[in-house]
Amino acid sequence: MCGRFALTISPKVLKELFQLAETPQLPARYNIAPSQPVAAVVLSDDSTSRVLKMPQWGLLPAWAKDPASRFINARSETAGQKNTFKNAYKKRRCLIPADGFYEWQKKRTPKQPYFFRRCEAIPMALAGLWERWTGPDGLVIESCAILTTAGNELMKPIHDRMPVIIDPKDFELWLDTTQFRADSLRKLLQPYPSEKMTCYPVSPVVNSPENDLPGCLEPLPGQEKPEKGPF
Protein backbone atom coordinates (compact mmCIF):
# COMPACT_ATOMS: atom_id res chain seq x y z
CA MET A 1 0.00 0.00 0.00
CA CYS A 2 0.98 3.63 -0.25
CA GLY A 3 -0.59 6.02 2.23
CA ARG A 4 1.82 8.95 2.44
CA PHE A 5 4.48 10.56 0.21
CA ALA A 6 6.47 13.76 -0.35
CA LEU A 7 6.93 16.18 -3.25
CA THR A 8 9.55 18.91 -2.92
CA ILE A 9 10.87 18.83 -6.48
CA SER A 10 11.58 22.26 -7.98
CA PRO A 11 9.07 23.43 -10.63
CA LYS A 12 11.84 23.56 -13.26
CA VAL A 13 12.88 19.93 -12.68
CA LEU A 14 9.24 18.85 -12.59
CA LYS A 15 8.55 20.48 -15.96
CA GLU A 16 11.66 18.97 -17.57
CA LEU A 17 11.24 15.47 -16.16
CA PHE A 18 7.59 15.14 -17.16
CA GLN A 19 7.81 17.34 -20.28
CA LEU A 20 4.96 19.53 -19.11
CA ALA A 21 3.48 22.23 -21.32
CA GLU A 22 3.83 24.81 -18.53
CA THR A 23 5.96 25.25 -15.41
CA PRO A 24 3.82 24.26 -12.41
CA GLN A 25 3.56 26.41 -9.31
CA LEU A 26 3.57 24.00 -6.39
CA PRO A 27 4.61 24.46 -2.77
CA ALA A 28 6.98 21.89 -1.26
CA ARG A 29 5.02 19.11 0.44
CA TYR A 30 6.70 16.83 2.98
CA ASN A 31 3.77 14.71 4.16
CA ILE A 32 1.03 14.32 1.55
CA ALA A 33 -1.93 12.36 2.92
CA PRO A 34 -5.18 10.84 1.58
CA SER A 35 -8.06 13.24 0.84
CA GLN A 36 -5.60 16.05 0.02
CA PRO A 37 -4.99 17.46 -3.50
CA VAL A 38 -2.02 15.84 -5.23
CA ALA A 39 -0.11 16.71 -8.40
CA ALA A 40 -0.96 14.35 -11.26
CA VAL A 41 0.46 14.46 -14.79
CA VAL A 42 -2.10 13.59 -17.49
CA LEU A 43 -2.50 14.04 -21.23
CA SER A 44 -4.43 17.12 -22.30
CA ASP A 45 -7.97 16.58 -23.61
CA ASP A 46 -6.68 16.64 -27.20
CA SER A 47 -3.77 14.30 -26.28
CA THR A 48 -1.18 16.75 -27.65
CA SER A 49 0.57 17.76 -24.44
CA ARG A 50 1.09 16.85 -20.78
CA VAL A 51 -0.61 18.94 -18.14
CA LEU A 52 -0.75 18.94 -14.36
CA LYS A 53 -4.02 18.35 -12.52
CA MET A 54 -4.64 18.51 -8.76
CA PRO A 55 -7.13 15.72 -8.03
CA GLN A 56 -8.04 14.66 -4.50
CA TRP A 57 -6.19 11.57 -3.31
CA GLY A 58 -8.87 8.92 -2.94
CA LEU A 59 -10.50 7.75 -6.17
CA LEU A 60 -14.24 8.29 -6.40
CA PRO A 61 -15.75 6.11 -9.18
CA ALA A 62 -17.85 8.01 -11.69
CA TRP A 63 -20.82 5.76 -10.93
CA ALA A 64 -20.65 6.13 -7.12
CA LYS A 65 -23.74 7.48 -5.38
CA ASP A 66 -21.88 8.38 -2.20
CA PRO A 67 -18.96 10.86 -2.63
CA ALA A 68 -17.43 9.40 0.53
CA SER A 69 -16.62 6.11 -1.24
CA ARG A 70 -12.91 6.63 -1.83
CA PHE A 71 -9.97 4.34 -2.67
CA ILE A 72 -6.42 5.64 -2.17
CA ASN A 73 -4.78 2.54 -3.69
CA ALA A 74 -5.59 0.07 -6.45
CA ARG A 75 -3.95 -3.34 -6.76
CA SER A 76 -2.22 -3.38 -10.14
CA GLU A 77 -2.90 -7.11 -10.54
CA THR A 78 -6.67 -6.60 -10.62
CA ALA A 79 -7.27 -2.91 -11.46
CA GLY A 80 -8.07 -3.72 -15.08
CA GLN A 81 -10.89 -6.08 -14.05
CA LYS A 82 -12.47 -4.43 -11.00
CA ASN A 83 -15.50 -2.27 -11.67
CA THR A 84 -14.12 0.48 -9.42
CA PHE A 85 -10.97 1.00 -11.48
CA LYS A 86 -11.28 -0.65 -14.90
CA ASN A 87 -12.64 2.40 -16.74
CA ALA A 88 -9.90 4.67 -15.37
CA TYR A 89 -7.30 1.97 -16.11
CA LYS A 90 -8.27 2.06 -19.77
CA LYS A 91 -8.98 5.77 -20.22
CA ARG A 92 -7.55 7.88 -17.38
CA ARG A 93 -4.03 6.92 -16.34
CA CYS A 94 -1.74 9.46 -14.71
CA LEU A 95 1.74 9.90 -13.24
CA ILE A 96 2.05 11.17 -9.69
CA PRO A 97 5.40 12.91 -9.06
CA ALA A 98 7.11 12.21 -5.75
CA ASP A 99 10.46 12.51 -4.02
CA GLY A 100 9.58 9.18 -2.44
CA PHE A 101 7.03 7.54 -0.16
CA TYR A 102 6.65 6.56 3.50
CA GLU A 103 5.85 3.15 4.90
CA TRP A 104 5.54 1.85 8.45
CA GLN A 105 7.21 -1.29 9.80
CA LYS A 106 4.30 -3.02 11.49
CA LYS A 107 6.37 -5.64 13.32
CA ARG A 108 7.72 -2.98 15.67
CA THR A 109 5.83 -1.33 18.53
CA PRO A 110 5.36 1.53 18.08
CA LYS A 111 5.41 1.28 14.29
CA GLN A 112 8.58 2.76 12.79
CA PRO A 113 8.13 4.96 9.68
CA TYR A 114 10.64 4.68 6.81
CA PHE A 115 11.15 6.86 3.76
CA PHE A 116 11.78 5.10 0.42
CA ARG A 117 13.25 6.84 -2.60
CA ARG A 118 15.30 6.21 -5.72
CA CYS A 119 19.08 6.22 -5.34
CA GLU A 120 20.76 9.64 -5.53
CA ALA A 121 17.37 11.20 -4.78
CA ILE A 122 16.15 10.99 -8.39
CA PRO A 123 12.41 11.90 -8.48
CA MET A 124 9.84 9.11 -8.81
CA ALA A 125 6.76 8.84 -11.00
CA LEU A 126 4.08 6.77 -9.27
CA ALA A 127 1.52 5.06 -11.49
CA GLY A 128 -1.95 6.44 -10.88
CA LEU A 129 -5.53 6.36 -12.10
CA TRP A 130 -7.87 9.34 -12.03
CA GLU A 131 -11.62 9.84 -12.31
CA ARG A 132 -14.13 12.64 -12.75
CA TRP A 133 -17.33 12.38 -10.68
CA THR A 134 -20.37 14.59 -11.20
CA GLY A 135 -22.96 14.88 -8.46
CA PRO A 136 -26.71 15.36 -8.92
CA ASP A 137 -26.26 19.04 -8.08
CA GLY A 138 -23.58 19.47 -10.77
CA LEU A 139 -20.64 19.32 -8.34
CA VAL A 140 -17.55 17.94 -10.12
CA ILE A 141 -14.84 16.08 -8.16
CA GLU A 142 -11.61 14.88 -9.76
CA SER A 143 -9.83 12.21 -7.75
CA CYS A 144 -7.05 9.66 -8.05
CA ALA A 145 -5.58 6.44 -6.68
CA ILE A 146 -2.04 5.07 -6.66
CA LEU A 147 -1.43 1.62 -8.12
CA THR A 148 0.46 -0.87 -5.95
CA THR A 149 2.38 -4.06 -6.62
CA ALA A 150 4.31 -6.68 -4.63
CA GLY A 151 7.13 -5.28 -2.51
CA ASN A 152 10.70 -5.66 -3.79
CA GLU A 153 13.50 -7.09 -1.65
CA LEU A 154 14.23 -3.71 -0.06
CA MET A 155 10.57 -3.24 0.78
CA LYS A 156 9.64 -6.70 2.05
CA PRO A 157 11.08 -6.34 5.59
CA ILE A 158 8.83 -3.30 6.05
CA HIS A 159 5.73 -4.07 3.98
CA ASP A 160 4.61 -6.60 1.38
CA ARG A 161 3.25 -3.95 -1.02
CA MET A 162 4.72 -0.87 -2.69
CA PRO A 163 3.57 1.72 -5.25
CA VAL A 164 4.20 1.04 -8.92
CA ILE A 165 7.05 3.27 -10.13
CA ILE A 166 7.13 4.13 -13.84
CA ASP A 167 10.48 4.65 -15.54
CA PRO A 168 10.81 7.86 -17.64
CA LYS A 169 11.21 5.82 -20.82
CA ASP A 170 7.73 4.41 -20.22
CA PHE A 171 5.93 7.69 -19.47
CA GLU A 172 4.48 7.95 -22.97
CA LEU A 173 3.15 4.38 -22.94
CA TRP A 174 1.53 4.80 -19.53
CA LEU A 175 -0.11 8.14 -20.31
CA ASP A 176 -1.29 7.32 -23.83
CA THR A 177 -4.95 6.39 -23.51
CA THR A 178 -5.76 6.81 -27.20
CA GLN A 179 -5.25 3.05 -27.51
CA PHE A 180 -5.35 0.31 -24.91
CA ARG A 181 -2.37 -2.08 -24.94
CA ALA A 182 -3.07 -4.42 -22.04
CA ASP A 183 0.02 -6.63 -22.43
CA SER A 184 2.40 -3.68 -22.72
CA LEU A 185 0.87 -1.95 -19.71
CA ARG A 186 1.01 -5.09 -17.62
CA LYS A 187 4.79 -5.25 -18.07
CA LEU A 188 5.12 -1.86 -16.37
CA LEU A 189 3.31 -2.98 -13.22
CA GLN A 190 6.27 -4.75 -11.64
CA PRO A 191 8.18 -4.11 -8.38
CA TYR A 192 10.84 -1.47 -8.95
CA PRO A 193 14.40 -2.92 -8.77
CA SER A 194 15.73 -2.87 -5.21
CA GLU A 195 19.22 -1.87 -6.32
CA LYS A 196 17.83 1.40 -7.68
CA MET A 197 16.23 2.37 -4.37
CA THR A 198 17.24 3.20 -0.82
CA CYS A 199 15.41 3.83 2.45
CA TYR A 200 16.01 5.17 5.96
CA PRO A 201 13.99 5.47 9.20
CA VAL A 202 12.41 8.84 9.94
CA SER A 203 10.84 10.52 12.93
CA PRO A 204 7.31 9.57 14.08
CA VAL A 205 6.44 13.22 13.47
CA VAL A 206 5.31 12.02 10.02
CA ASN A 207 2.58 9.92 11.67
CA SER A 208 0.27 12.93 11.82
CA PRO A 209 -0.82 14.36 8.45
CA GLU A 210 -1.01 17.74 10.17
CA ASN A 211 2.80 17.75 10.29
CA ASP A 212 3.79 18.87 6.80
CA LEU A 213 7.34 19.85 7.74
CA PRO A 214 10.89 19.38 6.37
CA GLY A 215 11.64 17.32 9.48
CA CYS A 216 9.40 14.55 8.15
CA LEU A 217 12.10 13.72 5.61
CA GLU A 218 15.05 13.84 8.00
CA PRO A 219 16.62 10.50 8.98
CA LEU A 220 16.77 9.47 12.61
CA PRO A 221 20.01 10.42 14.42
CA GLY A 222 22.87 8.17 13.33
CA GLN A 223 21.21 7.31 9.99
CA GLU A 224 22.72 8.47 6.71
CA LYS A 225 20.52 10.37 4.30
CA PRO A 226 20.99 9.59 0.57
CA GLU A 227 22.86 12.06 -1.61
CA LYS A 228 20.89 15.14 -2.57
CA GLY A 229 19.58 14.89 -6.11
CA PRO A 230 18.97 17.51 -8.81
CA PHE A 231 15.93 19.06 -7.14
Image (cartoon, helix red, strand yellow):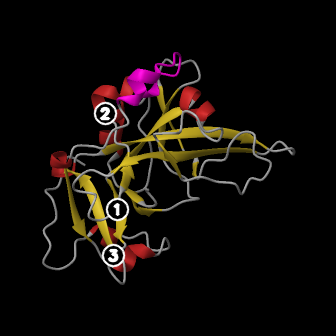
**Which label was assigned to residue 16?**
2
Residue beneath the point at 28% across and 26% down: 169
Q: Is residue 94 magenta?
A: no
Front residue of 66/160: it is 160
Q: Earlier in the sequence, mark 2 or mark 1?
A: 2
Between the residue at mark 1 and the residue at mark 3, the CA separation in whole angstroms equals 9 Å
Judge the density around disc 2: few (<14), some (14-19), many (≥20) Cα neighbours within 10 Å: few
**Amino acid on which disc 2 is placed:** Glu
Q: Secondary structure at mark 1?
A: loop
Which of the 4 image quadrants contains residue 21? top left
Disc 3 to disc 2: CB gap under 8 Å: no
Q: Is residue 176 magenta?
A: yes
Residue beneath the point at 30% across and 65% down: 158
To which residue does mark 1 refer?
Answer: 159
Judge the density around disc 1: few (<14), some (14-19), many (≥20) Cα neighbours within 10 Å: some
To which residue does mark 3 refer?
Answer: 107
Q: Which residues are magenta?
A: 174-187
Q: Residue 72 at what x, y percent from top left?
A: 54, 53
- Viewer-nearest of labels 3 and 2? 3
Between the residue at mark 2 and the residue at mark 1, the CA separation in whole angstroms equals 32 Å
Disc 1 to disc 3: CB gap under 8 Å: no
